[in-house]
């Protein structure tokens, strides 16, 4: 089922009668198929999912643990994931956080205790800032950075990422992309052309252009590269918390 918009949004935008399960061309199921294609295109363009129902799974993302200099007796670690926000790192959901501990990768999700807030990182094993896609590790000894992990990979993370509530601009872009698909098919006879109106091919291109403009103006394109990697970083050097 579509997540970013509904078939009723498309008929309202095109100013046509509501789509029907069998008695309209296209039918409801066909329009919903067009919407799902538009959603997949938006996700490809933005490198992000904009609804929990469309959450994307990253399997074994290679990351490095950034060591945070601490005044305590131990050093804390920080991992910046490539995508954000993430849903959670939870047992039973298939999520994993495999961190190199000198001789083997240890799955923190399965064997460690996760705190519920940033203050819990003091007495829990790890905490996840789901909004920014950052994982904090309570104790990451410096010798782990010196002992070379296999292929230089400090950790592997499996997680799901998505924005829980679809933003209005993403919904509008999905409507425009879907309308463009419908308008370009003259055989549908859905959009009647008058003497003073644009032909369907021109309308379709206009809708396409508007969808792209929405994504560009709101800085949605290549979203994972804009700021997540500037927070926390990917380096392995010591930093001040």
Image (cartoon, rainbow, N blue to C red):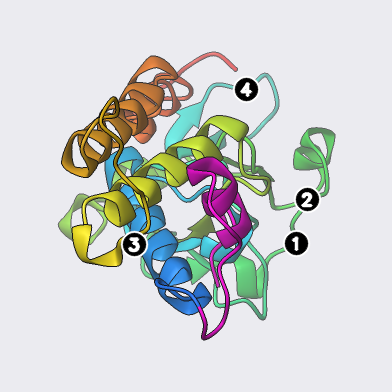
Disc 1 + disc 2, Cβ < 8 Å:
yes
Residue 63 visible, this orientation: no
Residue 233 horizontal/vertical position (percent): 39, 25
Nearest to the observer: residue 83 or residue 77: 83
Identify the residue under disc 2. Answer: 124
User: Mark 2 or mark 1, which is nearer the start of the sequence?
Assistant: 1
Identify the residue under disc 3. Answer: 37
**Given this view, does label 4 or label 2 mark the residue nearer the observer?**
2
Q: Residues within 10 Å of mark 2 (few under 14, many from 20)?
A: some
Say the numbered circle drawn on residue 113. Answer: 1
Task: State the extent of the magenta-drawn residues as a range.
Answer: 1-23
Which residue is located at x 78 percent, y 50 percent?
Answer: 124
Which residue is located at x 61 percent, y 62 percent?
Answer: 18
Which residue is located at x 31 percent, y 61 percent?
Answer: 189
Quarter of the rendering occupied by the C terminus: top right
Secondary structure mainly formed by the magenta segment = loop
Disc 4 + disc 2, Cβ < 8 Å:
no
Identify the residue under disc 4. Answer: 70
């Amino acid at each position: 089922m579509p997540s970013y918009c509904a078939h009723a949004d498309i008929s309202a935008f095109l100013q046509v009668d509501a789509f029907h399960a069998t008695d309209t061309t296209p039918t409801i199921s066909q329009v919903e198929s067009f919407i799902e294609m538009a959603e997949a295109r938006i996700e490809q363009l933005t490198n992000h999912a904009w609804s929990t129902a469309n959450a994307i799974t990253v399997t074994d993302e290679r990351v490095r643990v950034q060591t945070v200099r601490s005044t305590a007796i131990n050093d804390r670690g920080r991992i910046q994931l490539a995508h954000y926000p993430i849903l959670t790192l939870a047992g039973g959901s298939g999520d994993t956080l495999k961190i190199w501990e000198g001789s083997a990768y240890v799955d923190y999700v399965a064997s460690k205790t996760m705190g519920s807030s940033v203050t819990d990182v003091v007495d829990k094993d790890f905490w996840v800032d789901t909004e920014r896609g950052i994982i904090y590790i309570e104790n990451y000894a410096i010798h782990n950075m010196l002992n070379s992990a296999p292929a230089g990979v400090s950790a592997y993370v499996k997680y799901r990422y998505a924005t829980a509530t679809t933003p209005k601009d993403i919904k509008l872009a999905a409507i425009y992309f879907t309308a463009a698909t419908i308008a370009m098919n003259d055989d549908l006879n859905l959009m009647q052309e008058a003497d003073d109106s644009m032909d369907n091919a021109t309308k379709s291109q206009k809708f396409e252009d508007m969808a792209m403009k929405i994504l560009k103006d709101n800085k949605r394109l290549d979203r994972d590269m804009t700021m997540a990697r500037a927070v926390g970083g990917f380096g392995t050097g010591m930093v001040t918390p």
